Image: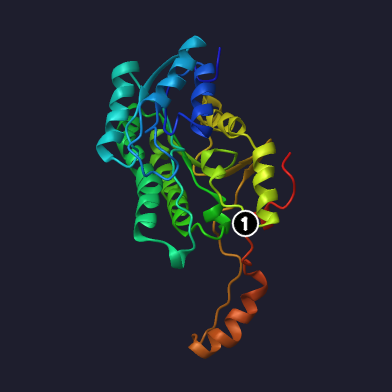
Amino acid sequence: MGVLDGKVVLVTGGANGIGKETALIAAKEGAKVVVNDLGGGVSGGDEGSAGPAQEVVNMIKAAGGEAVANSESVADRAGAKRMVEQALDEFGGLHSVVNPAGILRDKMFHKMDDADWDQVIDVHLNGSYNMAKAAIQHFRDQEEGNFVLFTSTSGLIGNVGQANYAAAKMGIAGLSRILAMEGANKNVRSNVIAPFAWTRMIATIPVKDEASQKRVERMRDHMRADQVATFCVGLCAEGAKNTSGQIFAVRGNEIFLMSQPRPVRALGRLEGWTPETVAEQCLPAMEASMQDLGATVSVFSWDPV
């Protein structure tokens, strides 16, 4: 008996990294799995191939599980609909959509091309919209459904050279929150995960100094994709039915519940504000409560467990 017995799970980006491990663990826990992967590179610049997704399906079947492959792109709205239709046609249902599919086009903002911006937004933010939109009515009609979407500390905290990725990932956090709020009375849940894991995407991060070299080595050696995938599958289980609208981070064997924006300091002025009093009184009074410009590594500064 597994925690996903009788469930159908659609996993995007399922041929590598977190997606692959999620598909394998979900199947091991009893789910029937649609393994989606475009089969392209991490930069999103090629046509892709159906082969990688089928390889994962073959692994699931060899272990006694049930799965089918799909090679549509999450960035294609019609393709997202076909993924959901395939789950319904092949397995007669759909209960969870796990959407880690993504690409990277890292570059300093002043050097970023429009294409670098557009493609990252299209795959990550629009891709999350496409997958959620394709499944939402089915979830509401059956009064059961679960989205596991992916944000990033690049957006929640910040990393230099990832303005496109950060913007998309913060948008996904907002999307998930509203999906959770609007779905509450229909038993439709949504949560987001900021993963720390060695994947093909992480392997493309340029190493320019000793600090970044150590950071990448730490991710490769101590933060595995299967650790994030285990948490993904846990969010799909019946035991997680009361968890929705949350932001999590997973790093090695550590699971973090992240804060969400709430007021931290307030100043009022009965006679109203002027530009001068804002600059000379309000902002200096709030300065001690402001977030600094430290990147993700400054927040998660200790070695992973």
Q: Amino acid at mark 1?
A: Lys
Q: Which residue is mark 1?
A: 208
How dense is the environment of label 1, judged by Cα within 10 Å: few (below 14), some, or many (20 and up)?
few
> Splitting the image into 4 quarters, where does residue 41 fall?
top left
- The image quadrant where one finds the N terminus is top right
- Return the residue nearer the eye: 219 or 175: 219
Total numbered badges shown on the rendered structure: 1
Residue 213 in view = yes
- The image quadrant where one finds the C terminus is top right
- Return the residue nearer the eye: 220 or 269: 220
288 relative to 53, above or below: below
Which residue is drawn at the image coordinates 50% and 20% (left, top)? 4
Which residue is drawn at the image coordinates 45% and 52% (left, top)? 105
Which residue is drawn at the image coordinates 52% and 11% (left, top)? 63
| Rendering coords of residue 82 (x, y %) | 27, 29
Residue furthest to the left in view is 78
- Return the residue nearer the eye: 133 or 105: 105
Residue 7 in view = no
